[in-house]
Image: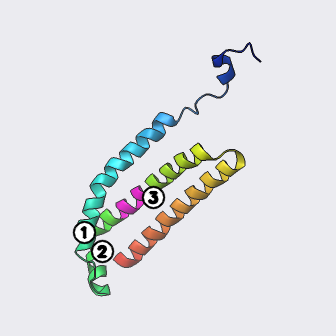
């Protein structure tokens, strides 16, 4: 084993060939959130503290509902990707796989719950 080169020791331990794609997904979602969060704050801020009727009337319009839905989806996808990177960096083996699946399920469940609540509010 002492006669192996560094390259030979690393053979088979190479990249998963998805790092660049994952990086770009994080960058795109970051830019999308940088645009969506101020729009969400301005659309949601105007109805904050309103009555239930005012809130349902506001979300019955397409613009606030679309902004809220897009913000919800993009933010939880960004959360899933960021949590996956953190899990990959600090865990190994079966724990890594279980945590990645758990975070993915959690984020998709949160998206589904949020969109369901938004649709119920808007209709």
Which range is magenta?
69-76
Query: Between disc 2 and disc 1, whose residue precedes?
Result: 1
Residues at marks 2 and 1 touching, judged by CB atoms closer than 8 Å: no
Q: Determine the secondary structure under disc 1.
A: helix
Tell me what residue is drawn at x 58 percent, y 30 percent: 15
Lateral position of residue 79 relative to residue 101, left or right:
left
Q: Residues within 10 Å of mark 2 (few under 14, many from 20)?
A: many
Give the camera-side residue of 87 and 110.
Answer: 87
Nearer the observer: mark 2 or 3; the answer is 3
Residue 80: image location, x then y, percent: 50, 53
Residue 59: image location, x then y, percent: 30, 74
Q: How far apart are marks 2 and 3 (CA)?
A: 20 Å
Which residue is denoted by mark 1 in the rendering?
43
Residues at marks 2 and 3 touching, judged by CB atoms closer than 8 Å: no
Which residue is denoted by mark 2 in the rendering?
59
Residues at marks 1 and 3 touching, judged by CB atoms closer than 8 Å: no
Residue 121: image location, x then y, percent: 37, 78
Q: How crowded is mark 1: few (under 14 residues within 10 Å), some or many (20 or more)?
A: some
Query: Between disc 2 and disc 3, whose residue precedes?
Result: 2
Kindly identify which numbered label has been placed on residue 96.
none
Q: Can residue 43 be seen in this view?
A: yes
Magenta run includes residue 78: no
Which residue in the rendered view is the most extreme toward the right?
1
């Amino acid at each position: 084993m002492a006669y192996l080169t560094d390259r030979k020791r690393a053979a088979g331990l190479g990249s998963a060939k998805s790092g660049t794609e994952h990086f770009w997904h994080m960058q795109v979602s970051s830019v999308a959130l940088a645009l969506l969060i101020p729009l969400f704050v301005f659309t949601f801020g105007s109805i904050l503290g309103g009555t239930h009727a005012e809130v349902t009337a506001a979300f019955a319009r397409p613009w606030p509902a679309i902004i809220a839905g897009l913000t919800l989806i993009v933010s939880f996808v960004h959360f899933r990707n960021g949590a996956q990177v953190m899990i990959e960096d600090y865990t190994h083996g079966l724990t890594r796989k279980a945590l990645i699946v758990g975070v993915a399920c959690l984020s998709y469940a949160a998206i589904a719950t949020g969109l369901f609540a938004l649709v119920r509010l808007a209709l």
